[in-house]
Amino acid sequence: MSTERNLHKAETLSQGSSSSDEEGWQDIEPDYEEGTVIKSFFDEKTFPDAKAMMIYCREKHNFDFMATRRRLNLDFHGAVKLSNYVRLKAQEGNATLGNISVDDLNDDIYLKPVLDNDGLLMSLDEILDEDDEANAELNTSPPSDIPVAQLLKKNALLEEQLGKLTEQFASFRQTVAETLDKRWGDDVTSENPDKTKNVKSGPAIPQSIDNNYFESYAGYDIHETMLKDTVRTEAYRDFVYSNKQIFKDKIVLDIGCGTGILSMFCAKAGAKKVIAVDNSAIIDKARENIFANGLGNIITCIAGRIEEVNLPVEKVDVIISEWMGYALLYEAMLQSVLWARDKYLQPGGLLVPSLSTLVIAPVSDTEYMNDCVDFWDDVYGFDMTAMKKKAMADARVEHMRPYSLAGSSSMFKRLELHDVQEADLVFTEAWESTIIKDTDALHGFLVWFDIFFTSRTETVSTDKLEPAKWHDEGTGKIAFTTGPLGKETHWKQSLMLIDPENPQPVLKAGDKISGKVDWSIPKDDPRSIVVEVSWKIGEGTMHKQAWNLR
């Protein structure tokens, strides 16, 4: 290792380490050196060592890392910055990195690892050594008139500094490993107040629940299911393509971008810039999809929570997101969209979609009860009625047949997404229904949601609060239902069955049923919901039951 770079590394490490950091390193045994894998700067290809990766990038992508490092005369500190700078720019879709200057690397943000487990940073010192030694052979020997004693003294000084460096460099490498699990952008420092972590209002979500939520979107199956949901995907596509004047030359933010499909719709509709954000590993595939479709110059992919990432713009013209969960609000993603709306959306900007409603209806379906509930009365000759309790405690995600409905539907909550606040997502609302058929028993309630896409100046009147009626208003009037009378969606409906120990009277067509819906968020699991329904038939006894959706 060159003694000159040792000095640079010692200086870099002394600046980048703090006493508090050192305390955190004492009991940690690094394990990153075994089986190191180096990922290409520009694609998903991996290599067993840094040299092979750099040769590949030079030949395949016309970027020579070592030549750039030599041209800029970068020390170890600068080479770390260069590596992270190239990875970051490549992720943003910048495929031309031949004109990098020293000024481009001034910001210390480029000390932050861009990739988790970036093997290049772990082995960078070794490949720099080899490069320095190779270039040293091309240089002339030191002047012979320098006294040997002076050279020996200088060498002794450097050896002493190298000894100190060894411990510091071990700390540095451990710091890099730790920051792969904790992004530097989350740290709060007095030197960088603008980089402080944004804290979302509302109930804190335990880390384990949050991690499980985002990990559930990292795989392929869930995205295949959503993309094949034509009701969902075609509604977004049709609104974007039928209203290109809304998106032309605009800056769009796509929250929870998944595979990137909504971002690509917006780019094709003429958006000037689209920022796609997702906190699951699917963001890597979204980036590949975007490049494969030639849209990397328009769409920028950013990994992280929307509340924590730093966007390349201060404001956007449009926010698009498919945030809906079961019963609309399960998963608590709407809270993140509202946070982004308040921080990033221009005054007069558009949320897509812009209106949602929650609907409830009474259910009576003897066939379903026999198949799915009374089944437990006799299971291969055994009494398993104890299992029924669970069936009554949790909401069930089902697509029910239209004839399961015992009464008319009742829209009990309207959410105008440009104006709604997080506090509005916990509520109590009245509902009522008219029984539409004679039935032996009321078995439960069915909850679903409807979604409406409007321009910023449009309002959906109460008499048009049904997707079919809004669609009939003309071209570009897009809406869809997740209810039993529409085409099945991946959201289905939420079925809440009444406990058999709470017997219900025989119902006649024309009977009135009324009550309230109480919607709450449990403190121990803020991504789930609890729905409590109260009801009475005519002037009869008021009943009440709560169900979990988790």
Image (cartoon, rainbow, N blue to C red):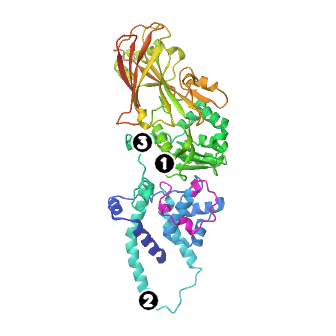
- Mark earlier in primary sequence (3, 2): 2
What's the magenta region? 89-116
Q: Amino acid at mark 3?
A: Asp
Q: Is residue 302 magenta?
A: no
* Residue depth check, mark 2 versus mark 1: number of the one nearer the observer: 1
- Give me the residue at 35% from left, 58% from top: 28
- Give me the residue at 55% from left, 27% from top: 489
The residue wearing badge 3 is: 210
Tell me: residue 302, above or below residue 334: below
Determine which quarter of the picture holds residue 194. Answer: bottom left
Tell me: residue 156, above or below residue 24: below
The residue wearing badge 1 is: 304
From the viewer's side, name the closer residue of 490 and 311: 311
Q: Residues within 10 Å of mark 3 (few under 14, many from 20)?
A: some
The residue wearing badge 2 is: 150
Q: Residues within 10 Å of mark 1 (few under 14, many from 20)?
A: some
Q: Are marks 3 and 1 in contact (CB under 8 Å)?
A: no
